[in-house]
Amino acid sequence: MKNKINQYLYNYRNLLVYLMFPIFITMICSFVMLLGCADTSEKKIKIGLSISSLRVERWPKDRDIFVEEAEKLGAEVIVQSADEDVNKQNEQAENMITQGVDVLVVIPQDSIAAAQIVKAAHAEGIKVIAYDRLIRDSEPDLYISFDNERVGYLQAEYLIRHKPKGNYFLLGGDPGDNNAQLLREGQLRALQQAIDNGDIQFVADQKHWAVDWDPRDALNKTEQVLTQTNNQIDAVVASNDGTAGGVIQALEGQNLDGKVLVSGQDADIAACQRIVKGTQTMTVYKPIKQLAKEAAHAAVALAKGETVQNANQTVNNGVVDVPSILLTPIQVDKDNLDEVVIKDGFHTREKVYQTQ
Ligand code: BGC
C-alpha cells in the first residue's frame, strides 16, 4: 500500500514537472523577449548624414548644427563627406546602411545618381531624407530645403530692378544639382518680361553652368564670355556666392568689378564683405540653423516611425509627390545686411565690415 502511494506520488510529481516545463520555458522566453524590447526602446537612434562635399562655406555649418540638434534629441550621427564624388557618396551611404543606421539624411552630389541610395536604404527598411537638394527617380521619405525656385527669382528680380536694360550673363550652378535647375527656372521667371520686351539680351545664351559649383570654373567661363562679348556685360546672374566670387575675379581682371551687377546666395562671409565693398550686388540669405534643426527633428521622428511635423506640402520628383518642408529665403543687399544676416547671428559685424 505504501509502495503504491509512493508510486502514485512519484508519477504525480513527474506529471507536474512535465506540465511545468513548457510553462517554465515560456516564462523564460517571455522574460528574454521583454528584455529585448526594453533594450530596443532604449537603443540610441543612429542617423547617417551623407554630405556631397564640405568645400562651400555653408556645409560645415549645416553639419555642425544638425549633429548638435540630433544629439540633443538623444540620437547619434555618423557623418561622411563624398568630396564631390558621386560613386564615393553611394559607397559611403551603402556603408552607413551596413552600420545599421535608422535613417539616412542625404545631401546628394547628383540628384539622379542618389536614387540608388534611396533604393538601397529602402531595401533595408531605412527612411531617407533629401536635405537641401531633391533626389529624383526614387521615393525619398522627405525633402527639406528652401524654396529654391524663389531663391533664383530673388536673385534675378534684384538685378532687373536695378538694371532694367542691357546684356545679361546667366551662370548656372552644378548641372547635376536639382537646385541649379530650380534656380534657373526662378531666374527666368523674374526676367521673362524684360526678355519679351527686348529690354535684356542673354550673352552666351543660357548654356553656362559652373561644374561642381566651382569658383574656378565660374572664373574661366566669365573670362571666356567677357572676351567673346568684348566686355559688353551689364549683369551676371550668378547662382551662389562661391561662383559669384569667381565671376568678380574675372571682372576685376577687366576693371569691371563694381560696375557689373552680380547676384549670389548663401551669405558667405566673403560675399558679405564684397557687398560692403560694392563688388557683389546682392546675396540670398537662407537661415541654415532653421533648416538643420528641422531636419534633425524630422530624422528622429522618421527613425521612431512617427510622422514629420511641418511637412505640409509636396514636391514632385518625377516619380512621386515627396512630402516636403520648404523654408523661406531672404533677399539681401548692403541696406539690410545688418538687419538680416548680422542680427540673425550668422556673421559678426566686425567680420562683415573688416575690409572697411
Ligand atoms: C545649395 C547652395 C550651395 C550650392 C553649392 C546648392 O545646392 O542650395 O546653398 O551654395 O549647392 O554647394
Image: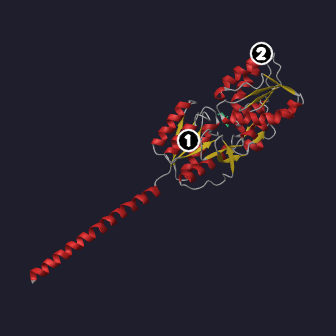
User: Which residue is drawn at the image coordinates 59% and 41% (left, top)?
Assistant: 138
| Quarter placement of the C terminus | top right
Residue 33 vertical placement versus 50 (above, below): below
Comparing labels 1 and 2, the label whose residue is closer to the camera: 1
Query: Which residue bears the numbered disc 1?
Result: 118
Location of residue 297 in the rendering, given as x and y in whole percent from the top left corner? 60, 51
Residue at 55% across, 41% down? 118
Q: Quickly name the residue at label 2.
A: 227
Counting residues from the start of the chain, the first of labels 1 and 2 encountered is 1
Q: Quadrant of residue 243?
A: top right
Residue at 70 percent across and 26 percent down: it is: 209
Q: Nearer the viewer, residue 154 or 337?
A: 154
Q: Position of residue 154 (x, y in %)?
A: 78, 38
Quadrant of the image occupied by residue 198: top right
| Disc on res. 70 | none
The answer to whether the residue bearing label 2 lies less than 8 angstroms from the nearest atom of ligand 1 is no
Asked whether residue 268 appears in the rendered view, the answer is no
Q: For ligand 1, which image quadrant applies?
A: top right
Q: In x, y percent, where is residue 139?
A: 60, 44
